[in-house]
Image (tube, rainbow, N blue to C red):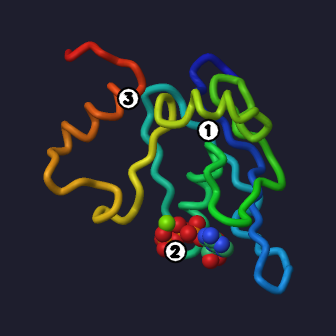
Amino acid sequence: MTSQELLQVRDLGVEFTAPDGSALHAVRGVSFTLNRGETLAVVGESGSGKSTTALALTRMLPGTGRITTGTVRLDGRDLAAAGEAELRAVRGARIGMIFQDPMTALNPVLTAGKHIDEVLRAHGNRDRA
Ligand SMILES: Nc1ncnc2c1ncn2[C@@H]1O[C@H](COP(=O)(O)OP(=O)(O)OP(=O)(O)O)[C@@H](O)[C@H]1O
Ligand SMILES: [Mg+2]
């Protein structure tokens, strides 16, 4: 990784186990690099694995979901192989997520600014500015 590279995903694979025990390959061979200060959009048809890819970054895969191949390097550290304590330090503090369903992810009586503020404070940032 160069110093410009913040997040480097290589050959990411995610599988779920179907009720009949067979493997469902939700994500296969995904690679991308996110540089510091850069915005990256992932576009694809419904069910193509966008949410699963995002959830795999911090290993928050639902149900039987698991990473089967690849690396997820954040500042060089491989989150695909990290322990729970290391992942807890990353989740919300370094990698956050706004979930797809706004009715469950966002509180309608709070402003967008208050939502952002709440996350920063929960992770120890007490500086109002
Ligand atoms: N909890 C789960 N259990 C089993 N299979 C799942 C689960 N979540 C997702 N999948 C499967 O993984 C594949 C990728 O789904 P994913 O939700 O990542 O797609 P998406 O690109 O985010 O779609 P959308 O645009 O509809 O949000 C699909 O085949 C889906 O059925
Ligand atoms: Mg999705």
Q: Amino acid at mark 1?
A: Thr
Q: Which residue is mark 2?
A: 45
Q: Amino acid at mark 3?
A: Ala
Q: Position of residue 5 (x, y in %)?
A: 60, 26
Q: Which residue is mark 1?
A: 33
Residues under numbered marks 1 and 2 in contact, where contact means CB atoms less than 8 Å apart: no
Q: How many marks?
A: 3
From what the image shows, is residue 89 above or below residue 22?
above
Q: Which residue is mark 3?
A: 122
3 vs 2, front mark = 3
- View extreme (bottom): residue: 20
From what the image shows, is residue 46 above or below residue 104?
below
| Residue depicted at x 67% and y 65% | 63
CB at mark 2 closer than 8 A to ligand 1? yes
Is residue 103 found left or right of 88 in the rendered image? left
3 vs 1, front mark = 3
Q: Secondary structure at mark 3?
A: helix
Q: Amino acid at mark 2?
A: Glu
Q: Which mark is residue 23?
A: none
Q: Earlier in the sequence, mark 3 or mark 1?
A: 1
Q: Quadrant of residue 16?
A: bottom right
From what the image shows, is residue 2 above or below residue 54?
above
Q: Position of residue 73 (x, y in %)?
A: 69, 32
Q: Secondary structure at mark 1?
A: strand
Judged from the image, the quadrant occupied by ligand 1 is bottom right
Q: Earlier in the sequence, mark 1 or mark 2?
A: 1
Q: Quote the CA–CA distance across marks 3 and 2.
A: 34 Å
| Residue depicted at x 20% and y 15% | 129
Q: Residues within 10 Å of mark 2 (few under 14, many from 20)?
A: few
CB at mark 1 closer than 8 A to ligand 1? no
| Residue depicted at x 63% and y 45% | 57
Q: Earlier in the sequence, mark 3 or mark 2?
A: 2
